[in-house]
């Protein structure tokens, strides 16, 4: 650990957190002890925390006061984590319809968030101090598994223009102090890519954090230009928010010369799981209860694939209780070789609502098609319409330099995923309009921003 890192992690960061009335340092230390607890002890801890959390929520959150009363649910009587199953799910439409009633009556200084999501429908929700504290502590604990501490130089490769807009002077100051730099990887032109590669080389970060599609794209661009990234001392690349594909992991690990640590989480659901050096994605079980449910909402046992439902125990100001993420995953009972007792989530299969079906019946994430087009700089906007299993239409809003070569790239890229004999029709249009999927007709679109 460098002198600067030690100074930041032991002095500046704790002071800053105290000023913000967060207690991240204490939470992180507690989590570093509890991660080694046996599963039974963690579950007992979860149960007690769940009881206290739901009692607090029942007393202060109007929406849940009503829900508990309707269900005849008494939080004080919780005797096991599974009692949670007596409560209804929380969904995005429910959050939209009850945004005000979901705020605790004594909540202060809530931060407002707005996520785009792949469906394009925004979700507005609020995050309180306690939740920020716990999410930062969970991320910090996970980076320390990889020998990266708060204060080590980090580059965050992010794609959301909304979050970039939120960056004000206070945050710039914090980023400089904490040595975190935000790199806006929303636009991936050749010039921008050259700039990103140069920034990474100049900055020599200990860690990169962000979308695997964006980071692998930058790494491959550097390779194409013959510029090395494996001599900078990068210790780990943390990826999150998207499915990590094997070819992306391979490129990132080879070109940065370091391991990739996969993570699962989102602005809405929190830092749910992180990969340890032994390879497992450990759930932040101190804060987050993960359930896997089938299409009818029944809870499934470990080993079976279903929708990931999360309850975040540090969200008393704006509760996320049995929140349906729309992502598909599997819980794994096998203990991890690292010795941590934290439960393991495996096979995050992507969003249940965003699947496409290949000619041979393979169900795959809609994003796998999006990547093909998003990686072509001359495509300004696009829409993919899977008309039938054998015909997919692509509308493209061409940008400068769009060529027949790009059309061929789209066709071969989609055929590689959907099937070699699938007909791919590429249409150039002046403007693509947003649209949602019908029953079999699957539409994916990216609207030029
Ligand atoms: Zn492990």
Image: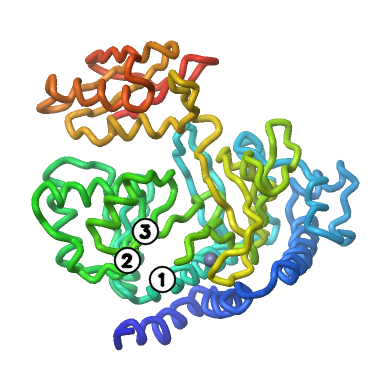
Q: Is residue 260 left or right of residue 111?
A: left
Question: Is label 2 in contact with label 1 (beta carbons under 8 Å)?
Answer: yes
Is residue 100 in view?
no
Crowd class of label 3 (few under 14; some 14 to 19; many from 20; radius 10 Å): many
At a point 25% along the width and 36% down the height, the residue shown is 375
Residue 6 seen: yes
Q: Identify the element where label 2 is drawn.
A: strand
Characterize the local packing of mark 2: few (<14), some (14-19) or many (20 or more) Cα atoms within 10 angstroms: many
- On the image, the x and y values in percent for residue 391 come to 37, 11
Quarter-wise, where is residue 187 in the image?
A: top left
Of the two numbered discs 2 and 1 in the rendering, the one whose residue sits closer to the viewer: 1
Q: Position of residue 113 (x, y in %)?
A: 49, 49
Q: Is residue 388 placed above or below 310 in the rendered structure?
A: above
Sequence-wise, the earlier of marks 3 and 2 is 2
Left or right for 22, reference 290:
left
Q: Residue tagged by mark 2? A: 207
Q: Residue 420, relative to residue 225: is it above or below?
A: above
Specify which label sits upstream in the sequence, 2 or 1: 1
Q: Secondary structure at mark 1?
A: loop
From the image, tell me which residue sits under label 3. 260
Reading the image, the residue beneath label 1 is 146
Residue drawn 52% across and 45% down?
348
Q: Quadrant of residue 131?
A: bottom right
């Amino acid at each position: 650990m460098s002198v600067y890192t030690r100074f930041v992690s032991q002095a500046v960061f704790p002071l800053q957190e105290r000023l913000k009335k967060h207690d991240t340092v204490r939470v992180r230390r507690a989590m570093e002890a509890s991660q080694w607890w046996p599963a039974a002890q963690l579950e007992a801890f979860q149960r007690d925390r769940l009881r206290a959390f739901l009692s607090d929520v029942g007393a202060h959150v109007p929406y849940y006061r009503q829900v508990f009363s309707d269900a005849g649910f008494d939080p004080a009587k919780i005797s096991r984590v599974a009692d949670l199953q007596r409560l209804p799910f929380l969904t995005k439409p429910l959050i939209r319809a009850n945004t005000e009633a979901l705020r605790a009556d004594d909540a202060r200084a809530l931060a407002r968030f707005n996520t785009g999501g792949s469906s394009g429908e925004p979700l507005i929700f609020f995050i309180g101090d306690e939740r920020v504290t716990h999410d930062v502590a969970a991320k910090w604990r996970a980076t320390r598994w990889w020998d990266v501490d708060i204060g080590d130089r980090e580059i965050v490769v992010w794609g959301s223009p909304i979050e970039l807009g939120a960056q004000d002077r206070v945050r710039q100051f914090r980023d400089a102090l904490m040595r975190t730099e935000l790199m806006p990887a929303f636009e991936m032109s050749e010039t921008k890519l050259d700039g990103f590669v140069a920034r990474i080389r100049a900055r020599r970060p200990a860690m990169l954090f962000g979308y695997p599609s964006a980071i692998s794209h930058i790494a491959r661009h550097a390779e194409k230009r013959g510029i090395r990234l494996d001599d900078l001392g990068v210790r780990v690349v943390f990826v999150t928010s998207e499915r990590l594909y094997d070819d992306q992991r391979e490129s990132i690990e080879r070109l940065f010369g370091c391991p990739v640590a996969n993570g699962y989480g989102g602005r809405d659901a929190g830092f749910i799981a992180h990969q340890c050096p032994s390879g497992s994605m450990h759930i932040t079980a101190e804060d987050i209860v993960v359930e896997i449910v089938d299409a009818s909402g029944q809870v499934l046992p470990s080993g079976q694939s279903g929708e990931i439902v999360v309850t975040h125990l540090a969200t008393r100001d704006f509760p996320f209780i049995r929140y349906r993420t729309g992502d598909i995953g599997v819980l794994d009972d096998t203990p991890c070789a690292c010795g941590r007792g934290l439960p393991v989530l495996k096979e995050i299969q992507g969003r249940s609502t965003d699947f496409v079906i290949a000619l041979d019946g393979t169900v795959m994430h809609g994003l796998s098609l999006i990547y093909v087009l998003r990686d072509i700089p001359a495509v300004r906007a696009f829409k993919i319409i899977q008309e039938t299993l054998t015909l997919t239409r692509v509308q493209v809003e061409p940008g400068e330099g769009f060529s027949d070569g790009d059309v061929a790239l789209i066709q071969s890229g989609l055929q590689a995923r959907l099937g070699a004999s699938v007909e791919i029709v590429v249409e150039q249009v002046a403007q693509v309009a947003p649209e949602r999927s019908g029953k079999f007709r699957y539409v994916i679109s990216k609207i030029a921003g």
